[in-house]
Amino acid sequence: MTQLSIIFLGTGGSWPTVNRNVTSIAVKRGNEILLFDCGEGTQRQIQKSNASYMQISKIFISHFHGDHFLGLPGLIQTMQLNDRKKPLSIFGPKGIIKIINDILNLGFFHPEFKINTFELKDKKIIDFKEYIIKTIKVDHGVNALGYCLEEKLRPGKFDKKKALKKGIPEGPLFSKIQKGKIITLNNGQIIKPEQILGPPRKGRKIVISGDTKPTKKMIDFSKFADVLIHDSTFDSKLENIANEYGHSTASQSAEIAEKAKVNKLFLTHISPRYLDNKILEKDARKIFNNSFVARDFQEIEIKYVN
């Protein structure tokens, strides 16, 4: 089974504070790290965490406000200084190609590893074999995207009694059939996985809203997610200000989580005005009890439901 975890590298909004850096979230799946947003100072946050910037294979930028992408130049240069060889893929809304080209021509810096850049639109689905990344256009006053990582269906539960009855010996063939592979017995009999395994089981799902006002589209996009990470910049008393500037309150995030029937909600992009985040958590838990204010360097493992 592939381990899946979330590492919150930066959970603040607008500018860094003593307790929170600006936005960046690492999703570690096996030996691969996917980075969602890369605010100023992200590489320093990575060095202080359990993540490794050399394991980052893909970076997804939600939009081009500085607290979401200004960490890219330093991170890319550090990768080069550490002799990175494998390619890096960077995704984002329209304009990301120009921004990356500008970064690669800053000063005397020219990375030797290949950087592939892709512009994404609303409702895009990118297939990465074992999982997909989906996009949604969010409501932030600028061209901005939310992202969903969704694992593909995995093989059903292994029925040992059925396997033995079919004449499959314990050992390597057990392992192959558990992985969904067709096997051939010594007598020439071909056994298909569906003859031994139960119905396919759903994979895990993580949704990251990016900066956004509450939008009904996010409910369907987040449906039954294991984890929803949602913009919760302000508390409910500042709802008008939050929405005016393209952000959500903790209680508005909780309403989306409740309607989407997610398992856990993490509140992020916390305004620098909050030295005590209990007010945000309290607001959210009035509506959705399984709500948590994310903390810098907090690490969450996402386990299979069955």
Image (spheres, rainbow, N blue to C red):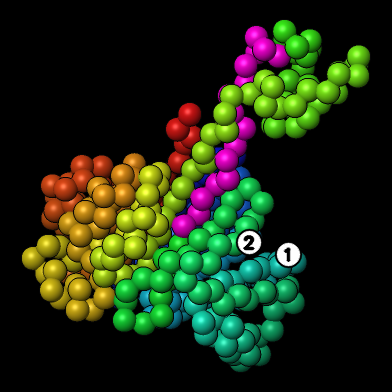
Give the side of residue 284 with respect to residue 299, left or right: left
Residue 45 location (% of width, % of height): 45, 62
Q: Secondary structure under badge 1?
A: loop
**Was residue 298 drawn as part of the magenta stretch in this picture?**
no
The residue that appears at 32% across and 74% down in the rendered structure is 139
| Residue type, numbered disc 1 | Lys
Rendered image quadrant of residue 63: bottom left
Residue 269 location (% of width, % of height): 30, 65
Q: Please say if the residues under marks 1 and 2 sit with CB atoms less than 8 Å apart.
A: yes
Give the side of residue 170 with respect to residue 57, left or right: right
Other-residue count near label 1 (Cα within 10 Å), few / some / many at <14 / 14–19 / ≥20? some
**Label 2 sits on residue:** 57
The residue that appears at 63% across and 24% down in the rendered structure is 197
Rendered image quadrant of residue 97: bottom right
| Residue type, numbered disc 2 | Ser
Which of the image's four quarters has the N terminus?
top right
* Tag of residue 86: 1
Tally of numbered tags? 2
